[in-house]
Image: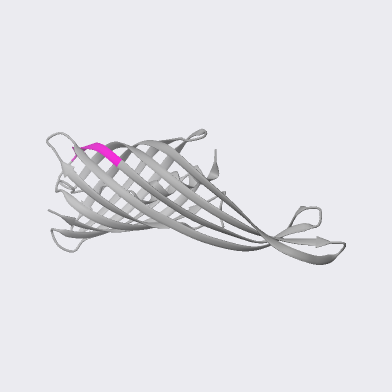
Amino acid sequence: MNSTVKLAACLSLALVSSNCFAQSKDYVEIGYGKISIKELSEIKPTGIALSAKKSFDQFYLQGTYIISSDKNSQQNDIASGVGARIIETKVDTDWKQFTLLVGHEFQLSEQSSLDLYGGYSRLKLQMDATAEVEYIINGEYRYRNEIDVSANNDADLYHLELAYARSVDSFDARAGIGFERINGEEGESSFVYLAEIGYHFTDHISANLNYRNADVYNNVGFNLRYSF
């Protein structure tokens, strides 16, 4: 699958908040995440997510908007043709993404629940790359030139997840498994594993640290939430 589309799709999941136990209240939230891509180890994208949740009688809705970017520069010594070599590459990546989740919580006890939810994401990715090329003829330096390449990619992401959550005093713990499907230039599906721990400072303010792992990426995220 196109690596830039995959990168954006992975980041979207890194930043979309999971639902901690005891979320019968509505909330607004801001989060920050960092992701590692197994196929693109030199790129470590980060981003900020704004999220809100609204509960109804039998289900809840959650919307998330993400703005993310990454800047990467590498020194190279790669032969790219007769008498030419690439000596430096710069890649700037910007993307925006909107996610809508719908879910239902099954209360198991006063301290535990099962959360079943699914979602759709729309991603828009812009990638600009610059390669500085040095031309050498007959063993002597001649001149340098810059080559610019831009790419725009859109992708749709679908995912379905089930998580078990438990609350003890002011702490929440959560673990789950899911399935995700990326529809871009090529389709790709994979299983997802997630874990999260949260702490309630007050009835309205909490913080959460989460970890997510899939076939092509893993990430750590942090968010602050105000419930009402």
Residue 34 visible, this orientation: no
Give coordinates of residue 119: x percent, y percent.
32, 37
The overriding secondary structure of the stretch rendered in magenta is strand
Report how many numbered discs are placed on residues in the image. 0
Q: Is residue 201 left or right of residue 140?
A: left
Picture residue at 25% right of the left edge, 39% below the top: 114
Front residue of this view, candidates 142 and 19: 142
Confirm whether the magenta stretch covers residue 107. Answer: yes
Q: Is residue 135 left or right of residue 29?
A: right
Q: The magenta stretch spans which residues?
A: 100-108
Q: Is residue 64 left or right of residue 93?
A: left
Front residue of this view, candidates 140 and 102: 140
Q: Is residue 26 left or right of residue 33?
A: left
Picture residue at 49% right of the left edge, 58% below the top: 44
Classify the position of the N terminus by image quarter: top right
Is 7 above or below relative to 138? above
Give coordinates of residue 182: x percent, y percent.
45, 36
Q: Quadrant of residue 159?
A: top left
Give coordinates of residue 185: x percent, y percent.
51, 34
- Which residue, as the protein is rendered here, is positioned at the far right? 138
Q: How is the image coloured?
A: one colour
Front residue of this view, candidates 169 and 31: 31
Is 37 above or below relative to 59? below
Picture residue at 44% right of the left edge, 40% below the top: 154
Give coordinates of residue 11: x percent, y percent.
42, 49
